[in-house]
Amino acid sequence: MAEQTWRFDTMMRLDGKVAINAGAGGLGQALAWGLSEAGAAVVVADVNMTAAEEVAEKIRAAGRQATAVQVDVTVPAACEKVVALAVERLGRVDVLLNGVGINQRCPSLEMSEELWDRINDINLKGAFFFAKAAAARMVRQGTPGKIITITSHMGLVGLEERVPYCASKGGIVNMTRALGQEWAKYRINVNALAPTFTPTAISAKALSNLELRQTIVDRIPFHRLGEPEDLVGAVVYMAAPASDFMTGQTMVVDGGWLTW
Ligand SMILES: NC(=O)c1ccc[n+]([C@@H]2O[C@H](COP(=O)([O-])OP(=O)(O)OC[C@H]3O[C@@H](n4cnc5c(N)ncnc54)[C@H](O)[C@@H]3O)[C@@H](O)[C@H]2O)c1
């Protein structure tokens, strides 16, 4: 019998790894916690420093390593600073989770250039330049790395009156393919995660419309909204050695929304 080399206790672990968790919102909190549960030291980065510090403090209170830093992801130099700070405080960078994003519903005939730019700058440009900053460090370290960006089921199907959001999220899906191809030579895996509606700040307005909320629940075969914890397993998998041969992919964790 061939030697069995796959071990669950190491393939899904991140011990000794440093993960930058960009985004301390509803999903970011759960994912930072999950990455730390899997063994990573975590740098929590968000434009909202109070939120980032709260997430880091919760992890530290559980006896694990975490640090918080403020970043505006639309500024490439600020993303580079987060990477430099991760190296300064924790010694290295192995994982980047790009979990920052905004949305604003707006009929397309009323769309302003300013709103279009703001959504795309944060969701798409920010994700690219953070990935670039992290990958540059991984290449310099000469170690493999993992980059995960949160897209959305709206990156794979359209939804009216959310066109810049859908465009930015679709952009992430194809950026992920192209970067995955380009950085395979450095052993950097680039993947994305597509959740469905999950109650957090970004979806609060949509979900406060009870009729729309019911329509969404009815559309999801599991007949409930997502929970941040639903995403932790997929993110840890994409950050851990178990996913070493997977790149350029978008993992859909949407309760079945996209089966229709
Ligand atoms: N919650 C959902 O229903 C849902 C569904 C699909 C995809 N997503 C995606 O998941 C990701 C996380 O969303 P969430 O649900 O945690 O939303 P959230 O609103 O709770 O958190 C978003 C975070 O992004 C931060 N942020 C905004 N602009 C920033 C900037 N310029 N620089 C740095 N940080 C900034 C905010 O401070 C906030 O902490 C987003 O990319 C979102 O598009 C969410």
Image (cartoon, rainbow, N blue to C red):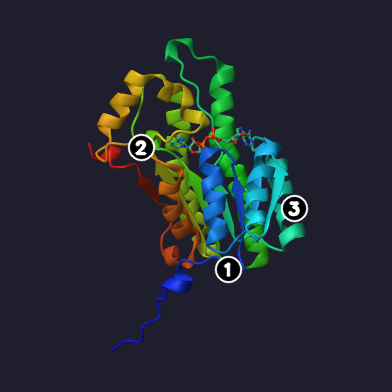
Q: Residue furthest top?
A: 110
Going by the numbered disc 1, the residue's amino acid type is Asp
Residue under the image location 46 percent in, 73 percent down:
9
* Sequence-first tag of 3 and 2: 3
Q: Nearer the viewer, residue 118 or 253?
A: 253
Report crowding for label 1: few under 14, some 14 to 19, many 20 or more residues within 10 A (C-alpha).
some
Using the numbered discs, state the Cα–Cα distance from disc 1 to disc 2 in whole angstroms. Answer: 33 Å
Q: Position of residue 71 (x, y in %)?
A: 69, 40
Asked whether 26 or 111 is in front, the reply is 26
Residue type at tag 2: Leu
Question: Which residue carries the number 2 mark?
Answer: 156
Which dot marks residue 15?
Answer: 1
* Residue closer to the observer: 245 or 95: 95
Q: Secondary structure at mark 2?
A: loop
Question: For mark 3, what is the residue?
Answer: 85
- To which quarter of the image does residue 259 belong? top left
Badge 2: residue crowd in 10 Å (few <14, some 14–19, many ≥20): some
**Relative horizontal placement of residue 38, taking residue 109 as reference (left or right):** right
Quarter of the C terminus within the rendering: top left
The three-letter amino acid code for the residue at tag 3 is Leu
Q: Where does the N terminus fall, quadrant-wise?
A: bottom left
Left or right, 253 with respect to 132, comes to left
User: Label 3: how many residues lie within 10 Å, few (<14), some (14-19) or many (20+)?
Assistant: some
Measured in 3D between alpha carbons, the distance from the residue under mark 3 to the one under mark 1, in whole angstroms, is: 20 Å
> Do we see residue 162 in this rendering?
no
| Identity of the residue drawn at 59% across and 18% down | 114
Q: Say which residue appears at 42% left-offset and 54% top-offset.
A: 234
Q: Name which of mark 1 and mark 2 comes first in the sequence.
A: 1
Q: Quadrant of ligand 1?
A: top right
> Mark 3, mark 1: which one is toward the viewer?
1
The answer to which of marks 3 and 1 sits earlier in the sequence is 1
* Element type at mark 1: loop
